[in-house]
Image (cartoon, rainbow, N blue to C red):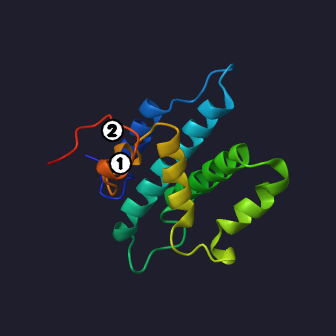
Amino acid sequence: MPDTTNQPDTEPFARAAALAPQPEQDGTVQDWIRHLAAEALAAHTVFRSMLPRISSTPVPGSRPELGYIIGLAVASTSAAVALTTPTDKVARKLWNLTPEAGALNGEYLDWLVSTLDRLGINPADIDPAYSAADFQSPSRAPIPT
């Protein structure tokens, strides 16, 4: 039986795909923003869940999936930002969401969850670290009591 202890949990991706599937050819901009933001939040969720399993002495190249996952998170976040921001302000908005610009406290996640909530997806349905009751959009999952 293969060792799956270091494999990423793909459940957040499955939830994101169910809540915001990739739009078809005639998808609207809002469909794409919803899909990209959900995919980005799922990737951030999976990446964060894998951090405790990283060896304190990793071998170079031992965890290539982490690079793919965080790359997906950054690309999807950037695409969603670009689709929600006036063209002449995209570069500034992207810059403002980077650590180099001082976004060291999860501002990009704040942007993702507020965007998803505004578009009708409760972020807690993708990332269990959030509480569904903290958002305006209805949860599609039962809220634990």
**Residue at horizontal 68 percent and vertical 20 percent from the top:** 25
Residue 118 placed where, x, y %? Answer: 51, 43
Q: Secondary structure at mark 1?
A: helix
Asked if labels 2 and 1 touch by Cβ distance under 8 angstroms, the answer is: yes
Residue 63 placed where, x, y %? Answer: 48, 63
Residue 32 placed where, x, y %? Answer: 63, 34
**Residue at horizontal 69 percent and vertical 75 percent from the top:** 101
Q: Residue 139 — which label?
A: 2
Vertical order, 114 against 20 (above or below) = below
**Residue at horizontal 65 percent and vertical 51 percent from the top:** 75
At label 1, the amino acid type is Ala
Q: Secondary structure at mark 2?
A: loop
Residue placed furthest toward the front: 136
At label 2, the amino acid type is Ser
Vertical order, 96 against 117 (above or below) = below
Residue placed furthest toward the left: 145
Q: Which residue is mark 1?
A: 124
